[in-house]
Image (spheres, rainbow, N blue to C red):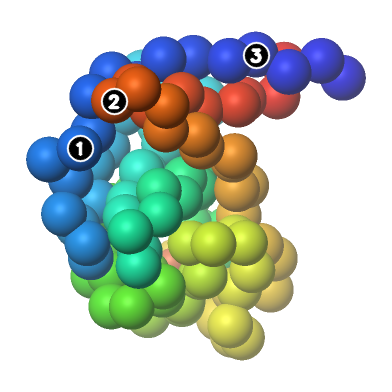
Amino acid sequence: MSAEFVELGDLSDLRDGRMKVFSDLGLHGVIVCRIGGTLHAVENNCSHRDTPLADGRLRGALITCPLHGAQFDVRTGAHQGPPAFAPIACYAVTESDGVASIQLDD
Ligand code: FES
């Protein structure tokens, strides 16, 4: 499996605790959010029943699915318990000279 790097542009205006959706990335789109000053990225899809997580709520590092309330850690993609039983994809994001880039798997 090889890695694909995609430029996301200048995300310096993405404030702590806020998220932005890139719907054209990956299979379901990607959520990029800033937590404690650092950018994180996860797929925009709940592993329980394929629901866009971007319609949910981000509190701290946990995003809550709007449909049945499953929670995922945006730093790792790990699920926090039922009703989800699987993690979501998590992607590495870098920020350099005002440009954010994400590393997607092919
Ligand atoms: S679809 Fe997300 S918790 Fe059920």
Residue 48 relative to residue 60: left or right: right
Residue 55 lies, with reference to residue 92, above or below; the image says below
Q: Along the polypeptide, which appears first: circle 3 or circle 2?
A: 3
Q: Secondary structure at mark 3?
A: strand
Q: Position of residue 102 (x, y in %)?
A: 51, 27
| Residue wearing tag 1 | 12
Instruction: Please state which amino acid type lies under the numbered disc 1.
Output: Ser
| Residue wearing tag 2 | 98
- Farthest residue, direction bottom: 81
Residue 50 relative to residue 22: left or right: right
Front-lying residue, 73 or 39: 39
- Farthest residue, direction right: 1
Q: Residues within 10 Å of mark 3 (few under 14, many from 20)?
A: few
Labelled pair 2, 1 in contact (Cβ < 8 Å): yes
Instruction: Please state which amino acid type lies under the numbered disc 2.
Output: Gly
Residue 69 lies, with reference to residue 103, above or below; the image says below
Q: Look at the image and tell me whether residue 44 can be seen.
A: no
Q: Residue at x 47, y 45 (%)?
A: 41
Instruction: Please state which amino acid type lies under the numbered disc 3.
Output: Glu
Q: Along the polypeptide, which appears first: circle 2 or circle 1?
A: 1
Q: Position of residue 21 (x, y in %)?
A: 27, 37
Q: Quadrant of ligand 1?
A: bottom left
Query: Whole-Å distance between the Cαs marked 3 and 1?
Result: 22 Å
